[in-house]
Image (cartoon, rainbow, N blue to C red):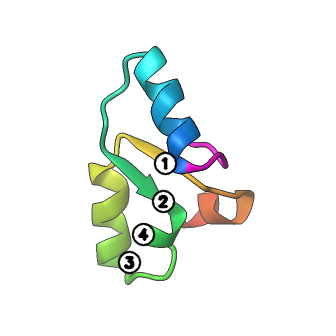
Amino acid sequence: MVTCDNNAIAKEISSQVNLKSNIANASDFVNESDSKAKQVVENADRFAQVFPEHKYRM
């Protein structure tokens, strides 16, 4: 799941549709090196506070 909502909203929606709980924010990967960003994106089950420009980085 990728949403621009904050963590609390993303957590609630995810629980309602039975998604796993590993959440990452755009700030967790957007300014990281390519290898670190790749690791964060691959390990996350859902993303919060993501805006269109962050999706290119994903």
Amino acid type at circle 3 is Asp
Label 4 element class:
helix
| Pointer 4 residue | 28
Q: CA distance from mark 2 to mark 1?
A: 6 Å
Vertical side of 45 occupied by 17: above or below: above
Rendering coords of residue 6 (x, y %)? 60, 50
- Identify residue for label 2: 25
Residue under pointer 3: 34
Residue range (magenta): 2-6
Residue 6 in sight in this render: yes
User: In the depicted view, which residue is nearer to us: 16 or 52?
Assistant: 16
Q: Position of residue 58 (x, y in %)?
A: 51, 59
Tag 3, which secondary structure?
helix
Give how far across and how far down residue 17 sits, in percent.
46, 16
In the picture of the structure, the residue carrying the numbered disc 1 is 47
Is residue 30 positioned above or below 10 on the image?
Answer: below
Q: Residue at x 62, y 64 (%)?
A: 54
Label whose residue precedes the other's in the sequence (4 or 1): 4
- Mark 3: give few (<14), some (14-19) or many (20+) Cα within 10 Å: few
Residue 1 in sight from this viewpoint: no
Give left or right: position of 16 versus 18. Answer: right
**Mark 3 → mark 1, Cα distance in angstroms:** 17 Å
